[in-house]
Image (spheres, grey):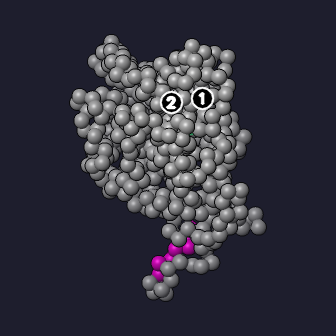
Amino acid sequence: MTKQLTIGMFQSGAVRRTWNMAGRETDRNFTDLEYWTDLARTCEAAGVDFLFLADSYGYPTLNSTIIPTAVERNVQFSTIDPQMLMSALASVTRTLGLVTTVSTMVEKPPTVTRQYRTLDHLSGGRMGWNIVTGSAQAASALLFGEPLMPHDDRYAKADDHVELSLKYWEGCWEDDALKMDSATGTWADPAKVHEIVHDGPFFSAKGVLVTPPSPQVTPTLFQAGASSAGRELAAKYAEAVFLAAESKALADQIADIRRRADENGRGRDAVKCLIAGTFRVADSAEDALAQHQAQIESISLEHAATLYAYYTGVDLLSLDLDRAMPASAANTDSGRTNVERFLGPDAPTVREILEEFRANGVMGKPFLGTPEEVVDQAVAMIEATNADGFLVQPDPDSGHDLFLTRVMPELRRRGLIKDELPGTTLREHLFGEGRTRLPDSHPGAAFRPANLRVLA
Ligand SMILES: Cc1cc2nc3c(=O)[nH]c(=O)nc-3n(C[C@H](O)[C@H](O)[C@H](O)COP(=O)(O)O)c2cc1C
């Protein structure tokens, strides 16, 4: 394989599931700043492209009520706000990309654009926005006192949100608008700072993003959520997408995203497709398998069902365990990725879905073995799916340590990752030196004042 992989490290603002395991006591320190700055420093030292901190306002509910197991066992429950960490992480790193999630259902475009622009300044152009419509939408809607919006409408709203956000980022400031000329006392040229006007189906606005352009102008755009509507959003706007499934499903999703990106005039390679994968590294394949098995046994079916309810709003334990999920249950208005992957002619039984969630959660099967073996498996996965890299999940025993200290050197030894990250911005890390801004083929480029003048 000749292509070099993009490597991101996954962590969420939530306390890790391993908080009560012997040897993982440090996972309880998720409210300490040092816990996060240490993680960022370690990721940077190993040379990964970025650290991604996932986030959601949701938690597991059924019938509009929190599931007690979620609280008792901490299933997708306690979290901090990752966005609050970002300036601290930027201050202790120099090259590491920093990616956070903000749901288009939660924050409005003026807030999102101002926050990311500020962080892009503070980090020297290393910020990425993971665009989601949000997991556990039912809980989130209740929390915000809003009705649960139908699934595809949420994506229509996301599209409108991103369009308006791009207008703010790309459309307000011409490149030479900021003068900061103390001799004339001119801060900025009013002829080169533009109010944008937007009248969309969900958002209407007229105004200016007052924070001047940051190194990337628009942060690098990520997306997660692989339902059909999610893939369409990714193909239109995302520069990188997070995907989690089995090899065949991943190959189908990636081919679909590339086809749709091409149809949108962006080209087949416009979107970096990153597989969310767990690497369990040990001194032998047998040890790795035994560790994985022990991990599965530590998780109850009730835990797995709570996790499934978090992602889908579906109560698997209320269904016949020996049949496939009935269409009535599958027709959920929560997240659909983890419903759609278990439908179709070869649909598993509900019990099999629970077992799959118990073993692997939303991820595909883990890579198990020595560093050499897991890299062999990872290469085979890239070849089978045509993906561009990995979003590495913490392994339950070592967190990220073994991946960073043992797998990264093996990837580097085989020339599968870059020796040095190109450029200084996150977009350059992903697409090469000099590519600090959105390419002209991205829909955001159409909102640049120079392009609007051409159209006028
Ligand atoms: C690796 C990965 C990371 C994700 N990170 C988030 C996240 O931080 N916040 C969130 O609400 N959803 C996240 N999602 C997506 C949700 O699980 C969910 O699929 C989506 O928000 C709902 O869209 P859907 O209906 O297309 O599934 C992530 C998904 C994957 C595969």
| Image location (x, y in percent) of residue 139 | 52, 44
Examine the image and state in which quarter residue 405 appears: top left
The crowd level at tag 1 (other Cα within 10 Å; few <14, some 14-19, many 20+) is many
Please give the name of the residue rendered at 33% of the width and 15% of the height, measured from the top-left corner.
Answer: 290
Cβ of disc 2 within 8 Å of ligand 1? no
Q: Quadrant of the C terminus?
A: bottom right
> Identity of the amino acid at label 2?
Tyr
Q: Which residues make up the magenta segment?
A: 174-181
Residue 346 is a magenta residue? no
Q: Which residue is mark 1?
A: 339
Residue that badge 2 annotates: 308
**x 55%, y 68%: residue:** 209
Q: How many marks?
A: 2
Q: Does mark 1 have its CB less than 8 Å from ligand 1?
A: no
Label 1 or label 2, whichever comes before in sequence order: 2
Residue at image x 33%, y 18%? Answer: 294
